[in-house]
Amino acid sequence: QVQLVESGGGLVQAGGSLRLSCAASGSILGINTMAWYRQPPGKQRELVAHITSSDSTNYADSVKGRFTISRDNAKNTVYLQMNSLKSGDTAVYYCHANAWITRTTSGTYWGRGTQVTVSS
C-alpha cells in the first residue's frame, strides 16, 4: 500500500507564492514519475507538471515560467513551487506517483488533494 499526502495549500493573494509538498510512504521500492494535477471548480482534472526519476520535467503551458516541480528521492517527496499566482490557478491540487511496489510490479497512486485559492 502506498499513500501520498499533500500539504502546503491555502489562501493567497494574486501575485503571491505557495509551495506544495507531497510525501509518499508505504511499501515503496522506488518511484518512477511524480506529478501534480489540479481540478478547478466545475472543470476536469488537468496535468500541471510532471517529473521523471531522472529529473526531466514538463509543464502545462498555463504555468510555464511560474511553477517549478522538483523532487527529493531520499524523502520520496515531490514539491511544486508556485509563483506569480493568478486567480485562474485556484483549484484542488493532487499529487500523483507511479511507484514500484515489487521488483516487477508498479502502480499509480493519488493523494487526496490540497486546496489552493488565489484571491484577486
Image (cartoon, rainbow, N blue to C red):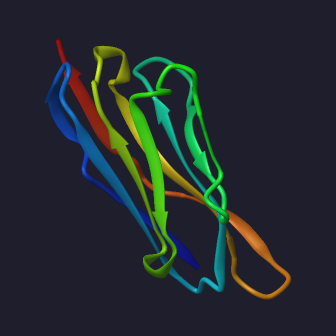
Q: Position of residue 94 (x, y in %)?
A: 46, 46
The image quarter in which residue 11 lies = top left
- Of 83 and 4, nearer the camera is 83
Q: Residue at x 20, y 21 (%)?
A: 15
- Of 77 and 72, nearer the camera is 72
In the image, is 85 to the left or to the right of 4?
left
Extreme top residue here?
Answer: 120
In the image, is 54 to the left or to the right of 87?
right
In the image, is 115 to the left or to the right of 33?
left
Extreme right residue here?
Answer: 104
Q: Quadrant of the C terminus?
A: top left
Q: Position of residue 82 (x, y in %)?
A: 33, 37
Q: Position of residue 93 (x, y in %)?
A: 41, 40
- Against 25, is 84 above or below? above
- Count of numbered marks: 0
- Against 114, is 76 above or below? below
In the image, is 58 to the left or to the right of 102?
left
Q: Residue at x 65, y 86 (%)?
A: 29
Q: Residue at x 48, y 74 (%)?
A: 76
Q: Residue at x 25, y 51 (%)?
A: 8
Q: Quadrant of the N terminus?
A: bottom right
Q: Position of residue 69 (x, y in %)?
A: 47, 48
